[in-house]
Amino acid sequence: MTVLPPAKPANFSRVTMTELMIPSYANFGGKIHGGILLSLMDKVAYAAASKHSGAYCVTVSVDTVDFLQPVEVGELVSLKASVNHVGNSSMIIGIKVISENVKTGVVKHTNTCYFTMVAKGEDDKPTPVPPLLLETRTDVRRFVEAIKRKSYKKEYDAMLHKIKQTWDQEAISSLLEGQRCEVAPELKK
Ligand SMILES: CC(C)(COP(=O)(O)OP(=O)(O)OC[C@H]1O[C@@H](n2cnc3c(N)ncnc32)[C@H](O)[C@@H]1OP(=O)(O)O)[C@@H](O)C(=O)NCCC(=O)NCCS
């Protein structure tokens, strides 16, 4: 008989990580490289997921990473992460990234995204994680939003799969009309 682990409050695994944006993080344009922010998001997602599960975790999927505003060298970036949803072995971590100019005190919301992490056991296979104890309305809202996003993603993936499977010359020609591309003549037949 498998003994299910007791539920853990969402609050238990909430993590905030703050890092100073140093010059070596900048890209050729002098702004912070998107990859640096992605790496920080991955770290904070890992921290929250491993705290909730008490296990080694891997990143499976990253959802809606949009960089809304550039981050400058010298700013303090804070990443707030919490476990929003749990499945059997998977956890959806919501991450809010803000960047603060310490001189002016101006705080920017640079992005919010969702990482799916999976807990792995000693055998390197997905292992069950504790259920999530929802103690506030915000916890419930986040859990429900994650269910909806999961369901939309399933539909979206199925749609993409269908698009890749079909070559409808008429539909393709109509979609390409007015686009900034030129199609080789032999492909128009
Ligand atoms: C993630 C991984 C463990 C899934 O293994 P699997 O044998 O397919 O296992 P399962 O089908 O049981 O899936 C495990 C969980 O992952 C979830 N999952 C799998 N693919 C997913 C995807 N693309 N998006 C979201 N969740 C996904 C499943 O829904 C399942 O969740 P649940 O247990 O809560 O129901 C495996 O694909 C893996 O190890 N990937 C590499 C991860 C990694 O190394 N990441 C670092 C970046 S290089």
Image (cartoon, grey):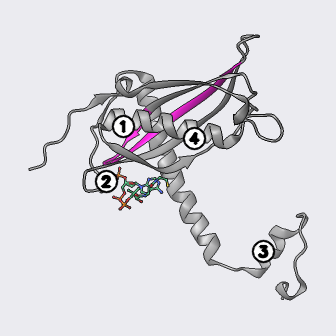
Q: Quadrant of residue 46?
A: top left
Q: Is mark 2 within 8 Å of ligand 1?
A: yes
Tag in front: 4 or 2: 4
Query: Which residue does the numbered mark 4 point to in the structure image?
Result: 39
Query: Which residue does the numbered mark 2 point to in the structure image?
Result: 126
Q: Tell me: residue 1, above or below residue 53.
A: below
Residue contact between numbered discs 1 and 3, judged by CB atoms under 8 Å: no
Query: Which residue does the numbered mark 3 point to in the structure image?
Result: 172
x, y percentage for residue 142?
Answer: 46, 32
Left or right placement of residue 131 versus residue 107 in this view: left
Q: Quadrant of residue 55?
A: top left
Question: For the stretch drawn in magenta, what is the main secondary structure?
Answer: strand
Q: CA distance from mark 4 to mark 2?
A: 23 Å
Q: Tell me: residue 39, above or below residue 185.
A: above
Q: Earlier in the sequence, mark 4 or mark 1?
A: 4
Q: Amino acid at mark 3?
A: Ile
Q: Amino acid at mark 1?
A: Ser
Q: Which secondary structure, mark 4?
A: helix
Residue 50's label in the rendered image is 1
User: Taking the image as four quarters, which one is ligand 1 found in?
Assistant: bottom left
Q: Residue furthest top?
A: 104
Local packing at callout 3 (Cα closer than 10 Å; few below 14, some 14-19, many 20+) is few
Q: CA distance from mark 1 to mark 3?
A: 45 Å
Q: Quadrant of residue 169?
A: bottom right
Q: Amino acid at mark 4?
A: Ser
The quadrant in which the C terminus is found is bottom right
Q: CA distance from mark 2 to mark 1?
A: 13 Å
Indicate whether residue 15 is drawn in magenta.
no
Q: Tell me: residue 181, above or below residue 53.
A: below
Q: Which secondary structure, mark 3?
A: helix
Residue at left offset 72%, top offset 22% = 74
